[in-house]
Amino acid sequence: MKLHIIKPSVNNMCVRVLVRAAELDIEEVDAYGNTRTDEFLSICPAHTTPLLEGDDLPNGAIWEGCAIMQYLCAANGLAQFYPDGAGDRANTDSAMQYVIGTLYPLVARATYPVLGFGLYAGEVGASDASDAEKAIARQSAQDALAEPLAVFKSFYIGDNDFIGGSSPSIADMRLASTLEFLNAVDGAAPDWMPGYIAAMETALGTAYTEPAADVRGYLDYVKSQAG
């Protein structure tokens, strides 16, 4: 199997963490600068990463990080990362969908302008609005992060170390990876984030810190360029 990735992306990071934590035999291919090539588009017309190629997949490949993680866990019996019980699995799925449906769009609006990533069509940051208007929109998104972040802490994590309880699940991999981008802007990270990230690093070791180093290295580079 091949996993096509872009290293500075937190959307890619979560899958890279799972592959390492589960010790899966999957070749990692750096797709930076190649997602619009004819070869890549023939596999993934959505021109997106992460992209997993596999012979047993109906179309030969799938994209979207959460779907890839769910597939890899189901295919390899990784109940330690994606529980078998219907209730626990539903909670894991709910947390991941809350990341990608509610939290991540705000993270993108708050951090992409700083990181130099293009925003999505229809966003203020992608329009011909003035720099002042774009700055207001970015700050509004950052301010709005407080609510979903509080929900993750109070509802999904609660008194546990992780969404998965005493050990990380794929929902934790998706959340923790997303939180890494909050270090791009001052005042965005919640108070509980450093302890949560530290717990992920302790639990998963280099399976977490190695992919995280690529994201953190990019953030450091961006900050250095900003002076």
Image (cartoon, rainbow, N blue to C red):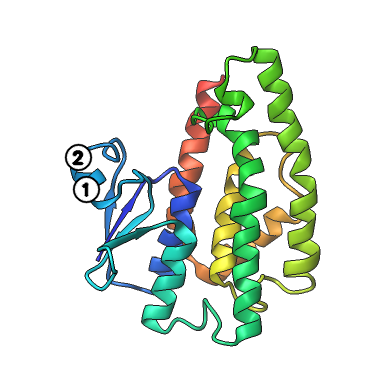
Q: Quadrant of the N terminus?
A: bottom left
Q: Position of residue 124 (x, y in %)?
A: 63, 25
Q: Quadrant of the C terminus?
A: top right
Between residue 45 and residue 190, name the one nearer to us.
45
Left or right of 101 on screen, residue 32 = left
Residue 206 shows in this picture:
no
Question: Which element type, helix, strand or loop, lies under badge 2?
Answer: helix
Q: Position of residue 146 (x, y in %)?
A: 79, 46
Residue drawn where x is 27% and y is 63% of the image: 59
Q: Which residue is mark 1?
A: 42
Q: Amino acid at mark 1?
A: Ser
Residue 45 shows in this picture:
yes
Q: Residue furthest left?
A: 39
Between residue 75 and residue 179, name the one nearer to us.
75
Q: Residue furthest bottom?
A: 85
Q: Report crowding for label 1: few under 14, some 14 to 19, many 20 or more residues within 10 A (C-alpha).
A: few
Q: Circles 2 and 1: CB distance less than 8 Å? A: yes
Question: Which element type, helix, strand or loop, lies under badge 1?
Answer: helix
Q: Report crowding for label 2: few under 14, some 14 to 19, many 20 or more residues within 10 A (C-alpha).
A: few
